[in-house]
Image (tube, helix red, strand yellow):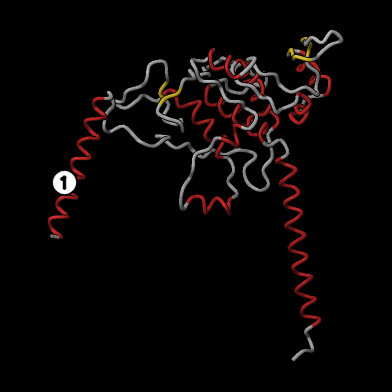
C-alpha cells in the first residue's frame, strides 16, 4: 500500500509539472523564465556615506540634484523635500531662493476664494509634475511614477541569509542606492532567448517588480552637462542621482551617526565606571 501511495504521489507531481509547462506555453511564456525578481542582484558599491563614519559627498549630491532636476523631475515628484534643505548640499541661501523661484506652486485661496500659482520660495516643497496620481498614470501608460522623497529607503533587494547577519556588524544600509544604480544601468542587458517581454515595457534584470518595467531608459551619455568636469556617463549619472536620493530620504544621516558615536563612547565609559564602582563596593565582601 505504501509503495502504491508513493507511486501515485510521484505521478501527481509529474502531471502537475506537465500542466504547468503546457499552461506556460499557452500563455506565450517560456517554462525556463524566472519566477522571482530581480533576475540579477545589484552590485554592492563603495559610497562615501557608507559605514558608521560615512559622510555625504556634497559635490556628488549637487551633481545628483542636477540629474533629478533636468531628467527625473519631469515624471517623479519629491513632495516631502523642501527647497530650504538644499542648503545641506552646499548651496547658499541666495542660490536656494533662485532654484526655488524656477518652480511654480499652487497657493491660496486668495481674497476671492480662488487658488492661484506663484513662484516657489525656500519653505515650499518640490511640486509634483502632475496634478494628481490619476493624471500621472494617464501620462505614463497607466503606471504612476513613484514619489522620490523616500525611494532610496523604500526600494532595496533582500540580501538573505547569512549576508544580513554580517550587515548588522558592517552597518550596511546602502541597499537602496545600490538598487537604484543597478536599475538605471541595467537597461543595456539583453533578455534571454525565449523570454517574452510585454509590449510597451523595457527589459531590466535588476527590476524587483518583474522582468520589465514601463519606464524607458532615462539616462544616456552626455544627457546632462557637469560643471566640475566629472565623467558624463550613464554609470556616473546613476551613481550621483542614487546618492542624491539617499540624501533626500535621510538628510540627517551624518548627525545621526555623530550622535550614535557619542552615545557609544558614553556607554563604554559608563560601563567602566559601573565596573570600578562594583569592585570598590564589594572589595571587602567575602
Query: How many numbered marks are there?
Result: 1
**Furthest residue toward top:** 112
**Circle 1 crowding by C-alpha within 10 Å: few under 14, some 14–19, many from 20:** few
- The residue at 24%/25% (across/down) is 26
Residue at the (18%, 49%) spot, across then down:
10
Label 1 SS: helix
Residue 259: image location, x then y, percent: 76, 49
The N terminus sits in image quarter: bottom left
Relative side of 230 to 251, left or right:
left
Q: Outermost residue toward the bottom? A: 286
Say which of 118 and 88 sits in front.
118
| x and y, in percent, of residue 109 in the image | 81, 13
Residue 151 sits in which quadrant?
Answer: top right
Up/down of 238 relative to 100, above or below: below
Q: Relative to 246, is 107 on the left or the right?
A: right
Give the labeled residue for mark 1: 11
Question: Which image quarter is the C terminus in?
Answer: bottom right
Which residue is the extreme one toward the right?
Answer: 111
Q: Position of residue 122 (x, y in %)?
A: 80, 22
Residue at 76% x, 31% y: name it.
88
Quick check: 46 above or below 86? below
Q: Residue at (51%, 40%) from the top-left corner?
A: 44
User: Could you say which quadrant of the image residue 24 lies in?
Assistant: top left
Amino acid at each position: 500500500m505504501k509503495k502504491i501511495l508513493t507511486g501515485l504521489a510521484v505521478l501527481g507531481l509529474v502531471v502537475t509539472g506537465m500542466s504547468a509547462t503546457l499552461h506556460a506555453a499557452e500563455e506565450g511564456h517560456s517554462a525556463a523564465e524566472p519566477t522571482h525578481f530581480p533576475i540579477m542582484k545589484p552590485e554592492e558599491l563603495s559610497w562615501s556615506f557608507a559605514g558608521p563614519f560615512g559622510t555625504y559627498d556634497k559635490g556628488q549630491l549637487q551633481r545628483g540634484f542636477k540629474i533629478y532636476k533636468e531628467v527625473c523631475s519631469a515624471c517623479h515628484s519629491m513632495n516631502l523635500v523642501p527647497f530650504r534643505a538644499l542648503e545641506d548640499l552646499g548651496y547658499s541661501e541666495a542660490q536656494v531662493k533662485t532654484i526655488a523661484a524656477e518652480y511654480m506652486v499652487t497657493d491660496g485661496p486668495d481674497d476671492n476664494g480662488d487658488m492661484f500659482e506663484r513662484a516657489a520660495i525656500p519653505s515650499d516643497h518640490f511640486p509634483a509634475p502632475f496634478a494628481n496620481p490619476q493624471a500621472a498614470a494617464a501620462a505614463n501608460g497607466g503606471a504612476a511614477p513613484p514619489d522620490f522623497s523616500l525611494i532610496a529607503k523604500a526600494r532595496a533587494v533582500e540580501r538573505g541569509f547569512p549576508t544580513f547577519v554580517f550587515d548588522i556588524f558592517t552597518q550596511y544600509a546602502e541597499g537602496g542606492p545600490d538598487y537604484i544604480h543597478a536599475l538605471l544601468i541595467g537597461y543595456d542587458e539583453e533578455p534571454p532567448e525565449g523570454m517574452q517581454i510585454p509590449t510597451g515595457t523595457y527589459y531590466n534584470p535588476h527590476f524587483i517588480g518583474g522582468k520589465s518595467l514601463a519606464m524607458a531608459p532615462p539616462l544616456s551619455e552626455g544627457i546632462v552637462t557637469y560643471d566640475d568636469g566629472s565623467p558624463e556617463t550613464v554609470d556616473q549619472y546613476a551613481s550621483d542621482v542614487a546618492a542624491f536620493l539617499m540624501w533626500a530620504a535621510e538628510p540627517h544621516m551624518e548627525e545621526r551617526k555623530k550622535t550614535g558615536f557619542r552615545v557609544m563612547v558614553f556607554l563604554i565609559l559608563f560601563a567602566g565606571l559601573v565596573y570600578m564602582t562594583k569592585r570598590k563596593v564589594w572589595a571587602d565582601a567575602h
